[in-house]
Image: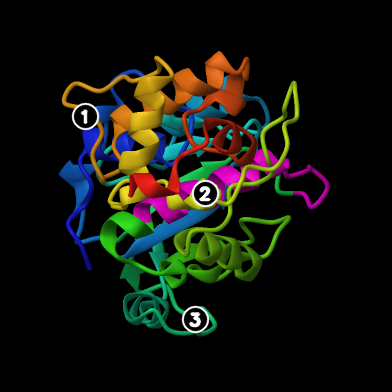
Amino acid sequence: MAKPLNASKMVEILRAEGLTVHEVRSWRTHNRNSKGAWGPVNGVMIHHTVTKGTEASVNICYNGYSGLPGPLCHGVIDKKGEIHLVGNGRANHAGLGDSDVLRAVINESKLPHDNEADTDGNARFYGFECINLGDGKDPWPEAQKEAIEKVSAAICRHHGWSERSVIGHKEWQPGKTDPRGFTMDGMRGRIAQRLKGGGGGGDEPTPDPKPVPKPKHVPFPGSGFFHIGQKSPIITAMGHRLVAEGCGRYEDGPSPEWTEADRRSYAAWQQKLHFKGKDADGIPGKVSWDKLKVPDGGK
């Protein structure tokens, strides 16, 4: 049970997780708070849109439709793994669900079968709609599944929740089938790994492979290591190396705590190595980390 994230903090933690975030129109004040409670929050709920096309899907989730006004979620996750924030506050996404399921989410215990619709889920869950037809044939690109993993982990980490605080709509409300195309148990396994410091997908491409760094340099700790709230002397040592490479984007200099300034500085380093797009998102990957040669003695 937690106080809901405000808009600025939501953007901050998602971008710190390495996600591309789009702020859609007046999303920061777009909600259904006048119709019911928003919070305390207990978890994250994943859906599929039953639509195709990013622009059309985002517009539907922002505006809603006849009989169900928007926002229909807090964020839309597109096929490229980019996040479109459409609501901040109560959203029409969860509907009524099973109170036993909510109790299990709060206790972070095994979910029971959902067989009732007696509890308001719109007050208790962040909702993310993923663009997919939900017909069992429409593919789920790895970039999109990784984004679901990252979004969920970022929110869980902020609130101190485990992966058991993330559920599918089909686990909440009887008769629902979303998300269809992957298992929620499998997704929770991915989220758990990211929360432990793993995850993050494959390595960055390298235009010019180098020999493996000598042991005196800090080994790559995994991309999941770098998130808001993480504190380590490794981050300070990394920051000093980035400054030495002319990539520092700090106002007060490097510190042990991972911040947005670290992400911007590391993105500058990735760009210096000629990485582009998602490979220059500011979240360290093994190739760029090995090239940075963060000294072990720097800690």
Name the side, left or right, on which 180 lies relative to 251: right
Cβ–Cβ under 8 Å for marks 2 and 3: no
Query: In this rendering, would 1 be left or right of 71?
Result: left
Q: Residues within 10 Å of mark 1 (few under 14, many from 20)?
A: few
In the image, which disc is placed on residue 29? 1
Q: Earlier in the sequence, mark 2 or mark 1?
A: 1
Read off the residue under disc 3.
Answer: 111
Q: Within 10 angstroms of label 2, few (less than 14), some, or many (20 or more) residues?
A: few
Residue 18 placement, left or right of 232:
right
Q: Position of residue 103 (x, y in %)?
A: 34, 81
Residue 72 within the segment the image draws in magenta:
no
Residue at 26% x, 37% y: name it: 31
- Per the image, label 2 sits on a secondary structure element best described as loop
Compared to 20, does 214 lie above or below? below
Rendered view: 6 above or below 224 = above
Residue 209 picture location, percent across and down: 75, 29
Between marks 3 and 1, how big is the CA–CA gap?
33 Å
Residue segment shown in magenta: 135-155
Please give the name of the residue rendered at 70% of the width and 48% of the height, measured from the top-left corner.
134
Question: At which x and y percent is residue 218?
Answer: 49, 49
Estimate the spatial distance between the alpha carbons at disc 2 and disc 3, rounded to whole Å: 46 Å
Q: Nearer the viewer, residue 33 or 282?
A: 282
Amino acid type, label 3: Leu
Local secondary structure at mark 1 = helix
